[in-house]
Amino acid sequence: MNRFRKPLLFLSDSALFLCAVGFYLIAVRYMPYTIVGGGNLTMDLPLLYGCIALSQLLFKTYDSLWRYAESKEYLTLIAAALVGFGLYEFLARMLRWSTMSFVLLSAIAAVWVLEMLSVRFLYRVNRSRGFRRKEDGAVPVVIIGAGGAGERLLDELRSNPNSRYAVQSFFDDDPGKRGKQLHGVPIRGPISAALPRIKAMGVHEVIVAIPSLSEVQRKNILEQVSDKSVHISILPDTLDLISGKPIRTQLREVRIEDLLGRDVVDLDNAAINTLIAGKTVLVTGGGGSIGSELCRQIAKRDPKQLVIVDIYENNAYDIQQELKFRYGSRLDLRVEIASIRDAERMDQLFRTYRPEVVFHAAAHKHVPLMETSPQEAIRNNVFGTLNLVRAADAHGVKKFIQISTDKAVNPTSVMGASKRLCEMIVQSMAMCSETTFAAVRFGNVLGSNGSVIPLFKRQIENGGPVTITDKRIIRYFMTIPEAAQLVLEAGSMAKQNELFVLDMGQPVKILDLAENLVRLSGYEPYRDIDIIETGLRPGEKLYEELLIASRDIEKTENEKIFVEHQPVVTPEELAEKLEILRAALEKDPSAIRSALHRVVPTFREPEELNNAQGERVEIPPQQSVGCAQ
């Protein structure tokens, strides 16, 4: 019927016009001639019909979906009728066809418009009632938030015949709304008291419909309504709703990052576009979690050419196919399988492609694995970075951005110490190269390869237990898109020798993260899914830091991004450190560890640091860069 919806509606309006003309005939018969007047039906009425019908077509009232119509659609129909009547008056007077009473013609037009409005309104009401008759078998749901988004969601759920939901109640913290009704649905509150009442109502579905919430507010609300018997869906942020898609289609599952309680970073997209657009950009480790997201973010900003370098061909192939499918010939994409350890190969790639911007994301990052294979961490992370820095300098790269980690701060692991050395390599290039070098340091990335969230999910799917190394462990977290965008933002800010740090807000206890993920999966921690400690892994800290010396930081244009100033590392000092490491590589792992203590003064053994913390490890009042002013 959708094919014939518009012509059928037009025919319906034409039939309604005939009904309105019937009003004229009745008026002629029963009302005094002085009121209704005379006139030529064959001239005035067809012209009136044609003008108003033409105006309705021009105003595209037949393109509206009247099952979802609101005041705007009804007002547009009235406006079209007024314009059509005005056109009739103009033509009738110009052609001297106006033989009927103006009052009567106005009444005919008004009756016709009233009939059109009534038919459309009754159709909309009937569609809604038709769905309400099905609500007996629908899934009861509660909506958190009785604002504009909640009202739109209720309307769409009621008017959509394919919806499986029947809204039972709203919950809202606004005292002015409580005790009232929204389209017949009661509004209750506050949200903090919602969970017991939701369970008492026998409702197992909850939708959080407050898109304007900050991340902290969303976290608080989710914690208040979270329960193993309740499935929670959530509307996206306000900007995502502007796309114009039906609001019901934008519901999504609650994600673990919703429970971090930290607002996302506000980025300067114009500056990032300037950095990338029209440039040849090379990404090492482009098939990894951070590297592949970097490639996605870069690809949508119109680079001249994107070069992906990775030693693992499977990941490189995956991101290659994804970008080719999404952008086709619009993106000049090249993929090279190569190791950053191979200095000659890196020199060849830089000589061939002449990249203007380089993002270095290739690294061995797994802490326990690098503890047992320290020589691999040094060869890949340290000397691989050295190869890239030398190639960038030799071939005129404009900007080189090194991706670092919070584990480089007062490192207790081989991996952390190796990344601190990478920062030193970048710092040593200050004042001796035309290339702008910088490093970006951030915390743990949710969902990245080897991160704790995929491990927890696998353990929950297998019925548990969920394993954590120590219940006291504290970590900073960010999402993969945030991490990639931070790197791009830092690249746009970089001038020389900076070490950029993100204010990642409050750190999170891994135990809390595990418990929340168990609840989001529909289970009760310790009852349905157990959480057990397995002991700290080699090189693992109880807590991570983002800064080496918090007093040595300064703000940037972005209030969430800071620059930490480190002591200058001269090329001579760096050469001496690297020579010590080269000599240690010829010996056993213990020699490498001893060498790292010599070349990285802040490197400490994990037992020393963790024993000093002991039971005193807690989430600090504000252990982030934002408080270090």
Image: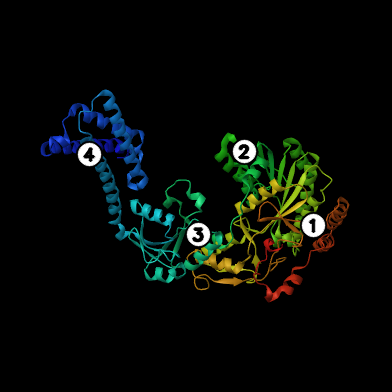
Q: Amino acid at mark 3?
A: Val
Circle 1 packing at 10 Å, graded few (<14), some (14-19), many (20+), is some
Q: Is residue 496 visible?
A: yes
Helix, strand, or loop for circle 2?
loop
Circle 2 packing at 10 Å, graded few (<14), some (14-19), many (20+), is some
Q: Is residue 191 left or right of residue 620?
A: left
Q: Amino acid at mark 2?
A: Asp
Q: From this viewpoint, which residue is outermost toward the top?
A: 95
Helix, strand, or loop for circle 1?
loop
Q: Is residue 65 visible?
A: no
Residue 107: image tag: 4
Residue 566: image tag: 1
Q: Amino acid at mark 4?
A: Ala
Q: From this viewpoint, which residue is outermost toward the bottom?
A: 615
Real-space CA distance between mark 4 and mark 3, rounded to the nearest whole angstrom: 56 Å
Residue 254: image tag: 3
Front residue (pair 390, 623): 623
Mark 3 or mark 1: whose residue is earlier in sequence: 3
Q: Residue at x 17, y 29 (%)?
A: 39
Mark 4 or mark 2: whose residue is earlier in sequence: 4
